[in-house]
């Protein structure tokens, strides 16, 4: 509202003065009250004409009047000059317009409802922003320690001066996180006996107390006080509800003289506790599931290879998914002994991918461990394994290749048997690549299994490659849809003459990976058995 030539009622003169529907007060440039209508006198009883405005009106209005009368003459009054302040328990809005002789006419209005609504809106915005920050921080991690740190830090920043968060535990050891406003969270693991827990906390951790409640600061045990907190004026203990059980509890501590919470703080606290508890519960469940998964996965991973005397052994494994560790391809090594015969290498492929295939892989490996001591030859071993798979695998099947290793001086005598599996390739020292003469039927499909065993002799520098069809059926190349194929694999293997077994596996895997690019692929597994090169004759006089 602006005016360069105020109307009569703005100057406090004329017949319309008393008809103004709101309180109006006119004050001169010297700060003296010139005129006030009945509404203004009802609001400011001391605002009689001739009195200083500093005595008749609150300080915020008198200060605004003095400031605006000192403005430059060309400055017009507008919405930017509106002021607000308390009058008798209400919030009053004062809008200035130009008055007589450089004075100001103040139009007064009760602004309490709008002011209260604005404050409520501001509080709600603050609460929404706080809860959004809480959710973002808690959802950023499935680690229980990180969730407890975020809970303690946010609570100490927005709700209390000091915070102690304790996680539910079935053991005497409890995870506890402290935080004092303005400081970093501090983690501790405390061995707490039931006697060390306040009764209210014991009930919360047992899931029997659904709401927050005050607690006597003098009754707080020493471990519940954050380091550096200082004197505690008030304490609140609130549960952190989880998924069907208690995720923990939280002490909210305030120093003496800190403002007491209002009703909106209670709503915020309940929302805070429910979100923090849900995040902590989810983190605990994730940790438990991860531990279970790690335990179950441990026996499904490719095994460590025991040393085989007189044999160079190397292996490679790549699951179909880049984020997976296990799949349907596998290999295993069974060291030989006097009562168990020659060392046996097993490489196989189970139908399917991922976890389901890995579970069947684990069954096959476990069954083989049990059958090898009672199976005198490959045919018997495959027959017994086939019978076991028929009873347990449903519509799944497996292929397998067995390699028994016998030593004859520097040479190796291999017995190779394929059961529906790609036949092993033999790399001779002169670069020739041969396919072993073995074949057989799938396992877990027919009541009877057929298999033919090939005997292959590896002279020094000769090598044998066992592999799964994830190599030959790898799609890629220039068209991104062409099989790697048998001939390409033979050509790559022929280039590996004289290389150690480890280098052969690395070479094959590198070429296949380049062929695949970023395309999808099946599980890949390979094993190289190599007869070490004969030692070179030493020169005369050499040590």
Image (cartoon, grey):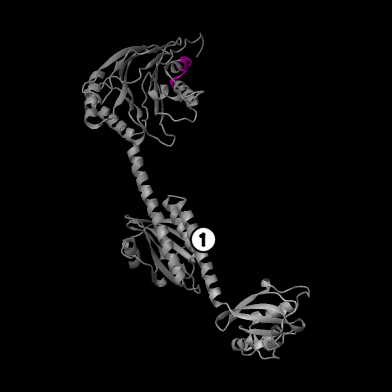
Q: How many labels does the image show?
A: 1
Residue range in magenta is 491-501
Please, what secondary structure does the residue beneath circle 1 have?
A: helix
In-image side of 482 versus 303 (left or right): right
Q: Based on the displayed image, in which of its 4 quarters is residue 428 positioned?
A: top left
Does the magenta segment cover residue 368? no
Q: Where is residue 297 in the image (x, y as percent from the top left)?
A: 35, 37
The residue lying toward the viewer, choosing from 109 and 501, is 109
Q: Position of residue 447 (x, y in %)?
A: 21, 23
The residue lying toward the viewer, choosing from 492 and 429, is 492
In-image side of 410 versus 23 (left or right): left
> Mark 1 highlights which residue?
129
Q: Residues within 10 Å of mark 1 (few under 14, many from 20)?
A: few
In the displayed structure, 416 sits above or below 300; it is above
Does the magenta segment cover residue 497? yes
In-image side of 13 versus 89 (left or right): right
Picture quarter with the N terminus = bottom right
Query: Which residue is depicted at the point 55% across and 70% down?
Result: 118
In the displayed structure, 257 sits above or below 480; it is below
Q: Which residue lies furthest to the right in this view?
A: 73
Q: Where is residue 334 in the image (x, y as percent from the top left)?
A: 31, 25
Q: Based on the displayed image, in which of its 4 quarters is residue 485 positioned?
A: top left
Q: Can residue 180 be seen in this view?
A: no
Q: Position of residue 325 (x, y in %)?
A: 40, 35
The residue lying toward the viewer, choosing from 395 and 361, is 395
In the displayed structure, 487 sits above or below 170; it is above
Query: Which residue is depicted at the point 39% across and 67% down?
Result: 237
Q: Residue furthest front?
A: 15
């Amino acid at each position: 509202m602006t005016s360069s030539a105020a109307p009569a009622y703005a100057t406090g003169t004329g017949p319309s003065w008393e008809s103004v529907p709101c309180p109006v007060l006119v004050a001169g440039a010297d700060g003296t009250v010139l005129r006030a209508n009945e509404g203004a006198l009802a609001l400011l009883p001391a605002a009689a004409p001739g009195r200083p405005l500093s005595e008749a009106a609150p300080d915020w209005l008198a200060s605004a009047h003095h400031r605006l009368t000192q403005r430059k003459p060309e400055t017009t009054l507008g919405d930017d000059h509106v002021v607000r302040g308390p009058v008798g328990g209400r919030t009053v809005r004062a809008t200035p317009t130009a008055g007589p002789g450089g004075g100001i006419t103040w139009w007064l209005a009760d602004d309490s409802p709008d002011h209260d609504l604005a404050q409520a809106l501001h509080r709600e915005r603050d609460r929404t922003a706080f809860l959004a920050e809480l959710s973002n921080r808690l959802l950023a991690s499935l680690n229980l320690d990180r969730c407890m740190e975020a809970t303690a830090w946010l609570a100490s920043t927005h709700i209390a001066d000091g915070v102690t968060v304790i996680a539910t535990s079935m053991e005497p050891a409890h995870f506890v996180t402290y935080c004092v406003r303005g400081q970093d969270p501090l983690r501790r693991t405390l061995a707490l006996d039931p006697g060390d827990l306040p009764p209210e906390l014991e009930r919360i951790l047992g899931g029997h107390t659904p709401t927050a409640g005050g607690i006597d600061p003098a009754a707080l045990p020493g471990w519940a006080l954050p380091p550096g907190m200082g004197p505690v004026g008030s304490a609140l203990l609130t549960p952190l509800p989880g998924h069907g059980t208690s995720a923990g509890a939280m002490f909210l501590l305030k120093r003496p003289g800190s403002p007491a919470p209002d009703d909106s703080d209670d709503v915020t606290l309940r929302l805070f506790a429910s979100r923090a508890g849900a995040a902590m519960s989810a983190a605990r469940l994730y940790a438990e599931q991860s531990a279970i998964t790690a335990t179950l996965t441990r026996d499904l991973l490719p095994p460590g290879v025991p040393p085989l005397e007189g044999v160079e052994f190397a292996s490679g494994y790549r699951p179909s998914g880049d984020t997976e560790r296990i799949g349907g391809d596998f290999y295993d090594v069974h060291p030989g002994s006097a009562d168990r015969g020659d060392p046996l290498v097993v490489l196989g492929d189970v139908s399917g991918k991922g976890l389901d295939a890995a579970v069947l892989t684990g069954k096959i490996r476990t069954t083989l461990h049990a059958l090898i001591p009672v199976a005198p030859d490959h045919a018997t071993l495959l027959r017994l394994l086939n019978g076991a798979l028929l009873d347990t695998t449903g519509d799944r099947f497996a292929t397998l290749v067995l390699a028994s290793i016998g030593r004859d001086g520097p040479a190796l005598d291999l017995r190779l048997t394929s059961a529906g599996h790609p036949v092993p390739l033999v790399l001779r020292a002169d670069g020739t690549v041969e396919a072993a003469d073995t074949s057989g039927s799938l396992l877990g499909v027919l009541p009877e299994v057929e298999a033919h065993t090939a005997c292959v002799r590896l002279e020094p520098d000769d090598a044998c490659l066992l592999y799964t069809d994830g190599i030959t059926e790898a799609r890629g190349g220039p068209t991104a849809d062409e099989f790697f194929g048998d001939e390409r694999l033979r050509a790559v293997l022929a280039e590996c003459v004289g290389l150690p077994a480890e280098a052969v596996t690395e070479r094959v895997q590198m070429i296949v990976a380049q062929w695949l690019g970023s395309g999808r692929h099946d599980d890949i597994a390979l094993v190289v058995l190599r007869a070490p090169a004969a030692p070179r004759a030493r020169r005369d006089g050499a040590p």
